[in-house]
Image (cartoon, helix red, strand yellow):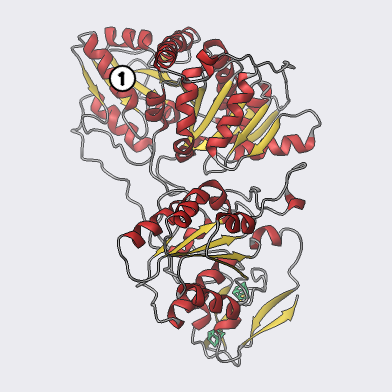
Amino acid sequence: MKRMIIGNQAIAYGALAAGVDVAVGYPGTPSSEVLNELFAYSKRNNQAPYVEWSVNEKVAFEIATAAAWTGKRALATMKMSGANVAADSILSVAYSGTKGGLVLYIADDPGAEAGMPEQDTRVFALWAGLPVLETTSPAQAFTMCRFAFELSEDTGLPVILRSVTSVAHAQEVVEADVSYHPRERTPEFERDISRFTKAGSVICLNQHRELLSKLDKAGSIIHRRGINRVVRPGGTLFAVGVGSVNPYLMESLPPEGEISAVYMESSYPLDSLLIGEVLEHAERIVVFEELEPVVEMLIRSEAERKNFKGSIIGKMDGCLPRVGKYTGKEILKGLASLKGEPVCEETDAVELTVKHPITFCAGCPHRGTYMSLNRALKKTKLGKGETIVTGDIGCTILGMNPPFDSCWTEVSMGSSIGLAQGFFRAGVEKPVVATIGDSTFFHAGIPPLINAVQHRADLLLIILDNGWTSMTGFQVNPGTEEQFQRGPAKKVSIDRIVQGIGVDALKVIHPFDQEQAVDVISAALLGEGVRVIIAREECALTRGRRGPWEKIYDIEPGVCAFCKACLRETGCPALLVKSREGKQVMWIAPELCTGCGLCFSCCSFDAISAKRR
Ligand code: SF4
Ligand code: SF4
């Protein structure tokens, strides 16, 4: 049946068609929709794979690995930075290999649309020694996902299926078979320490040799299957496109015969047989790939081995950029250079224009937490802008933007707590505040908190607990209320974890109760040792989906002095400026207001009041 789907849905359908038994992951843009789709499928159908949002990518990969070691087919999904978290296990499992198909779906983000480093998974794959299959469109992603499971079983290696934002979120009408074809295998796992442990150098070296020979085998299979191919034979000028750039390349090619086009749908190991043929016939080659010059480097090395006399154009000669995503512009430039037309200009970073700061949604409890933190910094005279506040990954980092201007740093999952300890150890005199969301705390915040307690650091940690992993699409996390967990899953208590670690003080605040929140934060700022505050209130969007708000707020235009204090302090998107009888007044959009009352706490003219919806 034909249907309009995005690339990530296509990956999910490909995994179902391949009979995946276990699908696990950690949410991260642009990869999250794969598991969302598998969850939706499992809700609608009795026969479905086991699907889980794991506590982090490392745990997810380990679950998938063990399932695959029993002969089942398993999928682990994550964004590129998640691979760093799972790296320890991925590199070790690469040595051990797999029995059932083990596919690692990693989505990169050229252009950094989700705001992280432009990390290229192919560099990671070179390091791990794992084959990489590329996606170019939703339709192709569906078939490539199925092939990834086959390749994994045929080689005995985990296979990386790589996507990028422009494919993961691209829409296409696809003839996709949305049905599940489980293989009905009985799970079997035999003890084999030479394969499943690293007990001694002989075992490790043998496993390394084995990995390299499996990688060679992967290269042969990929070549035989025609995954990479000359799609349009032409003259002696060759344009090589890798993965996501291929649709742009096809659109930009000049009339038939002038340039030969080569489609690469796998980037590692290099299809050296195909590239060998290209090198035999080419006078000049241009390589198009987003991010790092991985395939270009491999082609250059093959060219040197074969004593290629022609020229290779790409990133390494400065013609094409290493920064940002590719569009037709880069392709046209590379093709022109291939034809020897204009001289390459310097293309550097893609220019980003930031139109307005991104802020919290109307009714977001994190707004209340940062407001109370700023108010407490004022009350204690420690001063906003003078007290270091480390931020973390997820919605909570929006506290770096106006009007809060709270967070000073954002590094990686859980890093706010480690960085806070570093600032303290460096001798920063004022108290250091770390902020982190609930999901991020579960993911990577617990070890640095243990470290802080063990080494008697002095810091205030605020855990902004909205009960969901909201920024990536409202996935559950271990702290989500049990009624919203899937199946028999149990809620894990942040409070008990924090208490169990042995912090010096723990308090819970409710971010919409500003009086209480400011008092508690003020006392904690002036305290000593490891102090933890849990700011607890559910995400406004998940709460809002369950039914209307009991009350909203309204502004009496005749009373409003238009001092803008409410807007200045909250930055709430429901607060708008309106013209009334020739003068400007503040106005609350009733369809956006959730009745959190934060603006009410800012108005000294009594212009804001609650009303029943
Ligand atoms: S704080 Fe009160 S008086 Fe000032 S703009 Fe807002 S509603 Fe009007
Ligand atoms: S009560 Fe005020 S701050 Fe809260 S959502 Fe409504 S307008 Fe925004």
Q: Residue at x 56, y 24 (%)?
A: 103
Image: 573 above or below 137? below
Q: Badge 1, how many Cα within 10 Å: few under 14, some, many 20+?
A: some
Is the residue at mark 1 in contact range of ligand 2, meaning its CB lies under 8 Å from it? no
In the picture provided, is 19 more to the left or to the right than 312? Answer: right
* Ligand 2 - quadrant of the structure image: bottom right
What is the quadrant of residue 519 in the picture? bottom right
Q: Residue at x 50, y 23 (%)?
A: 93
Pick whichever, 585 or 518, lies toward us.
518
The residue sitting at 32% across, 46% down in the picture is 350
Residue 87 drawn at (x, y percent): 45, 33
Q: Left or right of 217: which side holds 41?
A: right
* Quarter of the picture holding the N terminus: top right
Q: Which one is nearer the viewer's eye here, 483 or 115?
A: 483
Task: Give the residue at mark 1.
Answer: 298
Q: Is residue 102 above or below residue 223?
A: below
x, y percentage for residue 495? 63, 59
